[in-house]
Image (tube, rainbow, N blue to C red):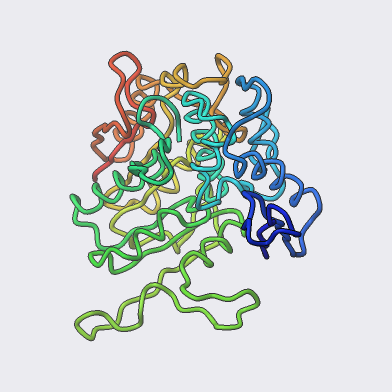
Amino acid sequence: MSAEPVPLDPALPHWGDSHYLSLTLTGTLRLSDALGQLYVLLPAMEGGDKHYWVDSTEIDKLLRAGGAPVDGVESEDGPGWLAEHPEREWITWRYLARRERYVRTALARLSESEDQGDTEDASEGAVRVPRDPLVEEREPSLADQRAGAVLAVLEAERATSVIDLGCGGGKLLERMVRDRNLERVTGVDVHLGGLEMAHRKLCEGCAPGGGRGHRPLFSDTGDEGGRRPRPELLLGSVVYRDRRFHGHDAAVLMEVIEHLDPSRLPAMEDVVFGDAAPRVVVVTTPNIEYNRHYEGLAEGAFRHADHRFEWTRAEFAVWADQVAQRHGYTVRYLPVGPEHPETGAPTQMGVFTR
């Protein structure tokens, strides 16, 4: 990238520079990706002042250009560039002309895409909406609240080894490997692309092509000089028994079960609760009752194109109680995210203990 100021008048240099600049971007990427980014970033950099009326249809335009799922159609390239952009809140805020309700909905759908590719939901306080980019008070997104709630449960249960089933791109793994109480961390996913993304996240200083090599966040030597294992990434499925799943204190299925066909749930239950049988199992899943707070989400529609179902709190409790009874667990329920008096929290969590 290079940027050169444009003078007010080249013949009168003492007048100084104008408010404009000549920007040159150089790179090698697919043309549609480049145009999609320019389509979003130009109005964002322009100040967020659209030259036409902004309504809810702009949300789909933004998501489509950002590579996120729209109308039930997922991108072949994962969650898309906007979902993974470090300044996605600021970009979304300005592209949607600071329309707060639209921004919340767009960020919620982007976060659902990120969880699936990595695998927020919207309403008051559920996602982070920037006010003034210069003095923004950053509140945790719902995805961050989910991960924080899972980590808090693992700490309360004194887990020392955890397997993240359906780890996706490693958002939760990235936080778990920094927890000094965890002596063993394993990530499992059925998609090789997700594991490759997780591998990149779990390495520091990894250059494209492996120029600098890989340095995992877990060192070989612990703080007291003892050996600490590196996080292990496994290609596998939660619906097939696997000896590698054995021997963990806790298992986590964070935003995973809703991506399984209901007919496959019994197989998952047998694998996780019956065969692997960790002491603690943490399950999070969307609360469909909360969906009515989402601007632009049609009635009866799911939050993500790949969701096979979304449960009410009562439906989740019926399923979880039956699983616990069959496999010798007790279960308690915790809300994640801001609670609405009528619809509850956007995410529901079940904590199973054996």
Quick check: 84 left or right of 26? left
Image quarter hosting the C terminus? top left
- As drawn, which residue projects farthest toward the bottom? 225
Q: How many marks?
A: 0
Place of residue 42 in the rendered image (x, y in percent of width and height, measured from the top left): 67, 43
Q: Residue at x 53, y 25 (%)?
A: 102
Along the line of sight, the residue nearer the viewer: 274 or 50? 50
Can you give x and y, in whole percent of width and height, for residue 27 in the image? 74, 64
Query: Which residue occupies 41% across, 54% down?
Result: 164
Residue plotted at (32% across, 46% down)? 281
135, 156: nearer the viewer = 135
Rendering coords of residue 5 (x, y %): 66, 59
Residue at 55% over, 83% down: 212
Residue 269 % position (x, y) = 43, 41
Considering depth in this image, is 348 or 123 the residue closer to the camera?
123
With 90 as the anchor, is 321 left or right in this view?
left
Which residue, as the protein is rendered here, is positioned at the far right? 31
* Residue 325 vertical position relative to residue 169 in the rendered view, above or below: above
Q: Is residue 20 above or below residue 269?
A: below
Quadrant the N terminus occupies: bottom right
